[in-house]
Image (cartoon, helix red, strand yellow):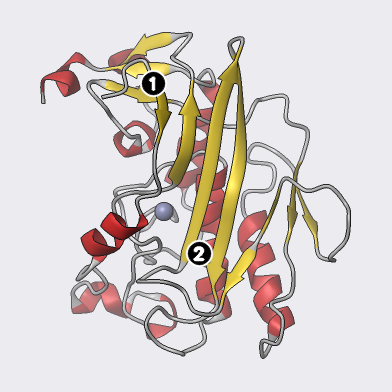
Amino acid sequence: MRRNPITLIATVALIATLAAFGRRTLDGRAAAQDIAGAPPACIEPACVTGPIVDAMVGSPVVTMEEREACRDVAYLCRGLDWNDGMARVLRWDRDTEVIRVRVPVPGGWPRAREVRDAAIRGLLAWNGHPFPIQVEERDGTAAVDFTVEWMASPPGSQLGQAGTRWTQENGRASIQVTSFRLALVSPGSSDELSPEQIELTAAHEMGHALGLPHSDEQRDVMYPENTARTLSARDYKAMQSLYRLPNGLGIWDAAKADE
Ligand SMILES: [Zn+2]
């Protein structure tokens, strides 16, 4: 229940991990299409939860009907978190000039630069969609919007994780990326992830960091399992749609309220 949300959503990692259990493999045909031959895995702890929104403060200032807001938006509206007939559009402010991300080399890791470069390629897949993305490769004091953290022992079935905090003051919305983590090894093993796998996960988590929810089709980078290879036309379209709608918009669907 959060039709007028002043809501603090606790991290759902435990529930998510339980929910994800058993969803790491698909049928043989799907597995054969996967990157580097590994069986598909959930990208986050749960294939269904999507990004973790740590906090969301403020009720919608503007509300639109689902049939108006959700026309021709690819998977955007299907992936949103619907509560009691209402979903929110949560994203960066459109006057954001550039998004700065620090991507450190994973310390003490073999092929560390290759791994770091793979993550950078994944992040930059969204460069210009809609904002320029600037990567800071060195440690230092340059101000960044968030820093990529490496997980040498990812918990549960986690390949990556993005957390955001979204707030609204005097009608003006702002988003903060509170965490952005990428696994170095396949969950539950010590097998190093391939650069392709790290690139894909980085692109998926960057999609969440920009505000995108999950897709319902395997070819999209925002599908919750690692079945895609590159951003799809639907990924771009969902992102464009997200940034066409007002930030903080409440989308109302009476049919979903009755469910
Ligand atoms: Zn995800």
- Drawn side of residue 236 relative to residue 26, left or right: right
Is residue 227 visible to us here? yes
Q: Is residue 52 left or right of residue 87?
A: right
Toward the left, the furthest residue is: 259
99 vs 35: above or below: above
Residue 74 visible? The answer is no
Residue type, mark 1 in image: Pro
Q: Position of residue 212 (x, y in %)?
A: 47, 41
Q: Mark 2 packing: few (<14 Cα in 10 Å), some, or many (20+)?
A: many
Picture coordinates of residue 258, whole percent (x, y): 11, 20
Q: Position of residue 205 (x, y in %)?
A: 52, 55
- Residue 89 screen position, x and y as percent: 45, 26
Residue occupying the point 55% across, 78% down: 184
Q: Residues within 10 Å of mark 1 (few under 14, many from 20)?
A: few
Q: Earlier in the sequence, mark 1 or mark 2?
A: 1
**Residue 201, labelled with which disc?**
2
Count how many numbered circles sit on residues in the image.
2
Q: What element does badge 1 sit on?
A: loop
Closer-to-camera residue (40/83) = 83
Q: Which mark is residue 5?
A: 1
